[in-house]
Image (cartoon, rainbow, N blue to C red):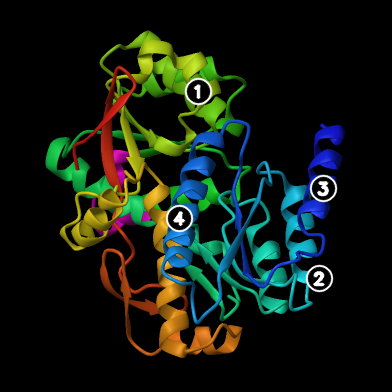
Amino acid sequence: MKKKIRNSIIGLMFILSPIKSEALNIAVIAPQEGVYQKFGQEIISGVQTAVNHINASGGLRGEKINLITVDDQCDNNIAISTAQMLAVNISEADKVALVIGPYCSNLLKEVTDIYGRAKIFEIIPIAVNSKLFTDKPEGLVTLAGYTEQQSADFYQYYKQRFSGEKVALIYDSNDRDTIDMAAALQQEFQKNGKLDLLQAYSYASFEDIEAMAEEVLKDKQHIAYILGNSEQTAEIASELKEEKKDFIIFTNKYVAQEDYDKIMGRQADDMYYFGLPSLKDNPDFAGTLVHLRLAGVEPEGLGVYGYSAVKLWEELVKGADSFEYEELAAELKKGKIRTTWGEVEFKDGAPADSLNFSIYKRNNGQYTQVY
């Protein structure tokens, strides 16, 4: 592991050596190997498409865009090293005007603080946990809003399909993100007077996964909302499905990666998965979609969010007639901003109305949206 980290940092130092170019540098931080490789590549592909479109039309304010891609491997050390090294490149040739990412929330508060102090505008293209930010840099944009919205969307779907049934809330009490998301779901049930139907189970409270599954089934639960990493989620979901084939399970689409599939096998089908909406079905995205398809691009998954992040930055630059950090931050506060899915008002760097999560059902590895 140390060798991989060292090699990655050496590679990053090489990438960030003086660039003999008149182009303006932007960087996208996303995993390019490991369990989250697929989503990282989708984001990078979307960012690259947007950069290509800007450059093909003559650039932005007369500047061509140079894209730097950095693989932080969702590793704490690399995440901090990446931010520190991007922050110290301050010469006109080497400095970075925009960071898109990171994809992973490892030390996100510390990372965003580094970019903020360096006056590097940052757009995170996916939903993040709002509790990670206590004092948000003014040049930080969370494009899709917050993960807590997942709880509200779960409750609405639960009310439509499973109202009155008990729900097992399974979470990791050693992980800040899952603690906050579990609390958000409890608040949602409490707000609707249904807290008695929600029973929480923490991994740390049980000797092993089998003991947890046994307790969930003993309590006559039939639905589980599972939070945790890929391995944890797969192990408890598999155990519950093994004991009761028709057990209904909800989890996050972005944990369902290679190690998850190895553990789950065909059991991964007929489960429910939360994910950001594709936007391809959003009427306000139709014009953008036509434009992309005419250019021979079919955006996949999170690629639309990588693309949208660059287009939002382009809109802010045009509105402010500047690349300067403070000018872009001020432009974001002026009112509704045109995005690829319509006009959006941002409050404290996040959409005033966080994007709703979609719910998908999986069959033969393919996801079909059901909500």
Graded by Cα atoms within 10 Å as few (under 14), some (14 to 19) or many (20 or more), the crowding at tag 4 reads many
Q: Is residue 146 above or below residue 204?
A: below
Q: Name the residue tied to disc 2.
A: 88
Mark 3 lies on a secondary structure that is helix
Image marks 4 and 2: residues in contact by CB distance under 8 Å:
no
Query: What's the CA distance linking mark 4 and mark 2?
Result: 25 Å
Where is residue 318 shown, x and y percent of the image? 43, 83
Distance from Cα at disc 4 to Cα at disc 3: 24 Å
Mark 1 neighbour class, 10 Å CA radius: few under 14, some 14 to 19, many 20 or more? many
Quick one: label 1 or label 2, which is nearer the N terminus?
2
Query: Which amino acid lies under the numbered mark 1 shown in the image of this protein?
Result: Tyr
Q: Which residue is mark 1?
A: 260
**Sequence order check: which comes first, mark 2 or mark 3?**
3
Residue indicated by mark 3? 9
Nearest the viewer among 207 and 118 is 118
Q: Quadrant of residue 251?
A: top left
Kind of residue indicated by mark 4: Gly
> Residue 68 lies in what quarter of the image?
bottom right
Q: Range of the magenta residues? A: 187-198
Q: Nearer the viewer, residue 94 or 355?
A: 94
Q: Name the element at disc 4.
A: helix
Q: Which amino acid, by three-letter code, is at mark 2? A: Val
